[in-house]
Structure formats: structure tokens, C-alpha cells
Amino acid sequence: MARPRIVIVGAGFAGYQTARTLSRQMRHNSDVTLLNPTDYFLYLPLLPQVAAGILEPRRVTVSLSGTLPHVRLVLGEADGIDLDGRTVHYTGPEGESGTLSYDRLVLAAGSVNKLLPIPGVAEHAHGFRGLPEALYLRDHVTRQVELAASDDDPKTCAARTTFVVVGAGYTGTEVAAQGKLFTDAQVRKHPLRKGIRPRWLLLDIAKRVLPELDERLSRTADSVLRERGVDVRMGTSVKEATHDGVLLTDGEFVPTRSLVWCVGVRPDPLADSLGLPMERGRLLVDPHLQVPGRPELFAAGDAAAVPDLENPGQYTPMTAQHAWRQGKVAGRNVAASLGFGERHAYRHRDLGFVVDLGGVKAAANPLGVHLSGPLAGAVTRGYHLAAMPGNRVRVAADWFLDAVLPRQAVQLGLVRSWSVPLDTASPELARVAGRPDRRQDTAPHSGPGAATAQDTGTAPDPEPAEGQAGAPEPAKIRPGGEAAKSQQGVEPAKGQPGTPESATNQPGEEPAEGQLGGREPAKNQPGGEPAKNQPGGEPAKNQPGGEPAKNQPGDEPAKNQPGPGPAEGRPGSAGPAQGQGRPGSGLAQGQGRPGADDLSVPGPAAGARGGEPEQGPGPVKRSDASAEGDS
């Protein structure tokens, strides 16, 4: 008799714990497969310490294959689920397509950044849900301080050293607290102009910091932030974001080059694509984490609306403490559905909360006992070491070295601004030069921290007049309604039918794209993607690992570009964002804290052979529509 096949989508807190439970309980009785874009689990609560240079990035990542014996790891992003055929369709890191068959499916796809209809935010802000965003923020903050130290203009210097964080929940509070310490340490090595100091603003429309927690924790966090010099403004948010700064709801304009978006999360759109009953974008399940009417389908974490048995009529919040424990219950109930053990209803009571405020400061209330200062800091770090499924010794060693040695503030240059857009369904993956993103626009946006022509080394060449040698051909519309983009140094033809008008460029910046009113259609809709203008002066490619375009002056026309006709699509699409909120093994880790799981640098696919063009990415089976009620 064939062994039952169990497929788990996502290796966030819920997915990882489900896989770990099944690997122990069903190791010789089933085939367990874990589908995830990368090969590690991300311990999100320590991500602010990565951005502040305290921990190295690998310290907060845990190897999936090394900690999940008897579990088969498949690298890829789920882009469609056939419930009747019991198959999961996915796209691998090199663009290949695949299908997994299952007898039991656990959906733990996690969540993505929550966007609000605020002009300019999608173009000028960056989220903080994945490792790529943490690495980008560390480099960006370091760069802004170094540039400010050498700038003669006091206004520019002040703008570069002003950092705006929107959202005073767990993530925003810890980012602001750690960031202020980081920049203060930097200016001791790079003194600024007299009278200028790094300025951090923490904004939220709520009445207090950490509004979802006990008021004593909120007062402690607020006091520490203000003593440290953070400008805490409650009841205030961003009304509009621009290249030069942000306009606040109280009418003040704050010049800045840095806008960090920590407002919250929404469920991954993969769950909504199933056509099953939903609750604000989350898949409805019973207390046993099973989808009614679908005995083979389970869901946990941010993707699931789980009834809260402690608060009848409500659903458990999208936090990692719930995702971590739901994963264990989901694993046991999947085994029980196959005849191994008994199933259990999910029930959990909070045992306390911890908030790391940087240095030796923290706020905590384990078992309801309110703590602050160094004692709370010790409890918080002890909890993190106990909760992590690996790397404990390495994390403790980094903490010790940070306490006795000066912190290193250097730019690694691994992640550029255009690699980590705010509006993405895969925050755990950084976009890679030379490989088009299957979800949406990969072009850089002008704005605070956006890649400029100087950053990429591709200063735009003068546009030749129409009719002269080297003038671009009129842009043609490809399937899906989007105009193909031009090659390096040549802007797209303007005024052609179906081609959106170009956003006004900032001085020295690349063309701003995706502005309000001129936003291009998302790339995950049916239709081939256009060629992308790559940074670093590389010619545009319209395939993963494809050959460079050849329509430069004096050469033969580029293949698979506008003119000969649209490129044929290759099946393939992006998958869901992985990950959940904070974990917890006793103390709750954070309300509203997302859990983007993994960072993967997908490799390019084999290039075209014999001079023939590769086929471009094709239609996908899912929609990245925002969850209903987010705005």
C-alpha cells in the first residue's frame, strides 16, 4: 500500500512547526514534502538586530534540511492549487514549473505587507518583513550617515539623517529603538555638521505605542524611546510620500530620504485564490484547523481564520505565537486524519509578552509580572534563545561580541532599493538583476533610498530624435496590456497607444514608475512580461538567464523585443510569501508581527541556444489582490 503524501506550503512559523511535528510523528508512515522558496526558516523577532548590525544575517536563519529529518524540501513558490485534482503547482527558483500531488495539504503561506491608499507610499517606502529588507535598511542607514558627514549643505545633511518609521506596533517600535542606537554610534565615527544629530520619528494613528499590549508595557516602551531621543508622535501618520520627504496628517512636511513601513500585514493572496469561504482574506477553518467540506485541507498561521475558543465569536490574531502553536496542532491533526493519534482543537492562552528595545533595555510581562530595564532585557534575550530552533550559540556569541567590541558599520551592497519594493507578494525574496520578476514591476522607483543612475552605473544616454539612427521603435503592446520597456540608455517611446506616460524624473534618478494614476498592471496577470532595464549597464533580458538584447546601434535587431512581435510565454509564476508572525514557547512574541520566512537568490535559467530567444514567463493562476477590508 502506498504511503500517504502530505504537502506543506510555506516554512514560516506555522509551516515549519507542522513539518517538524510530522517528521517526528509520521517519519516512517508517510511522505512529507515542504514547499518553500528558500532552504531556511527565518526567526523574525531578531530581524531588527540584523538591521542594526548586532547579528549577522545567517544567525536568524535555520536550515530546513538540517533540522527537519524525514521531510523532503522542494524549492519553489506555489502559484496554484487544484483542490479537485489534489495537486499544487509551483515555480522553482530557476523558472521551472512543477506539480506536487497530495493526500493531505497544509496551507501555511503566511502574509504580505499591508498597503494603504496613501499617495507615494508604494513608490517611496520600504517594508520590514524579510531578510532582504533588513539588509537593505542597514546599508541604507549607513550610507545616509556617511553621505551626510561629507555634505556641505545643512538642509541635505538634516534630510539624510532623518528616518521616519510608520507603525508603532512590535516591528516599528523595535526598528526605531534599535535604529537610534545604531545611528548614534555611527556619528561618533562620522561627526556631522554642528547642531545636526540623527533624528528618528515613530508615527502611528493609535493613541499610544504598542496599542495592542498592556498599558504598562506601552508606557515603558514610550519612556525608553523618548529618553533615547526618538520623536514619538501618536495620532499622526503619513498623508503623502514624495521624493524629498513625507507630508504628515498634521500638515507638517518632514524632509527625509528614509521611510520605513511597519503598518501591518495582510494574508497571502494564495488563500483567496482557492474560492473557499474567507474571513478578511483568511481561509475559514474549524477549531481543528480543518477546512469545512474539505477533509484533506488544513490551514494554519496568518493564512487561516482560526476560531478563538478563549474569546467566542472572534478569531485568533495574526501573530507568531499563534502560528507557532497552530503548526503543532495542525501536524497532530493531519496525522490523526490518517489514523495516527487523536486530533485536538486549538486553544491557547497568552503567558506574557517581550519587547526588545535595544541595548540592555526591554519591556516584558512574563506570567503577568511587569518588568523593565536590564532585568526585562535579560528575560527577553533568554526567551529568544529558548524559542529559536537553532543557532543559539552563534546568536549568544554575537551578543557578547557586540557588548565588548565596537559595532561594524559598513555597506555590503548586497541589496539595492529596487530589489525590495513595498508592494510585493514575496518579501522573503530579493529581486535579482538579469532575471525578470514574475509578480510585478521590477523597475527602480525614484524616492527615498531608491536606486539612482549613479547607483546602477547606467546614466541614461540622450534620447535620439525620431527618424535618426539609433532611435527606438514605437513601443508595442504585449499580451496583458503592458508596453515593452526599452534597452539600456534608451527610454521607451512616449505617446504610443497603450503606453503609460512616464513619471517625472528626479534629478539624477532613473524614471519613476508605478506612480499613482500611471501604475502599470501587476505582472502576475495573464500575459507575457516585458523585458526589464537592468542595473549596472547590463542589456535588457526577457528570459531568466537569457542572452543580451542586440538592438544596439549598428547591430541586428534585438530578439523577443517590440517590433518582431510579442514573445511567447513560458508557464511560470511566482508564489506566495512565506512566513508567519512571532513565535513563542511560553511568552508571546508580538501582536501584528509578520513572519516573512526566507531569502533566496534564485539562479538564472539556461540561456537561449543557437541565438534563438527563450520564451518569457507566462500566465499564473493566482491574483495578488489586496485582502478585503485592509484599507
Image: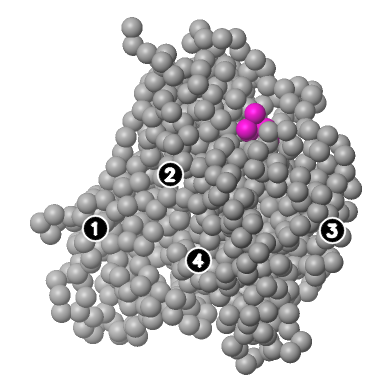
Q: Are marks 3 and 2 in contact (CB under 8 Å)?
A: no
- SS assignment at label 2: loop
Task: Return the residue at label 3.
Answer: 222
- Write the residue at 67% across / 17% down: 345
Disc on the earlier residue, 3 or 4: 3
Percent coordinates x, y for residue 387 in the rendering: 64, 38
Picture quarter with the N terminus = top left
Q: Is residue 360 above or below residue 551?
A: above
State which mark lies toward you, 2 or 4. 2
Disc on the earlier residue, 2 or 4: 2
Q: Amino acid at mark 4?
A: Ser
Residue numbers of the magenta segment: 321-325
Task: Return the residue at label 1.
Answer: 546
- SS assignment at label 1: loop
Residue 417, labelled with which disc? 4
Disc on the earlier residue, 4 or 1: 4
Task: Return the residue at label 2.
Answer: 38
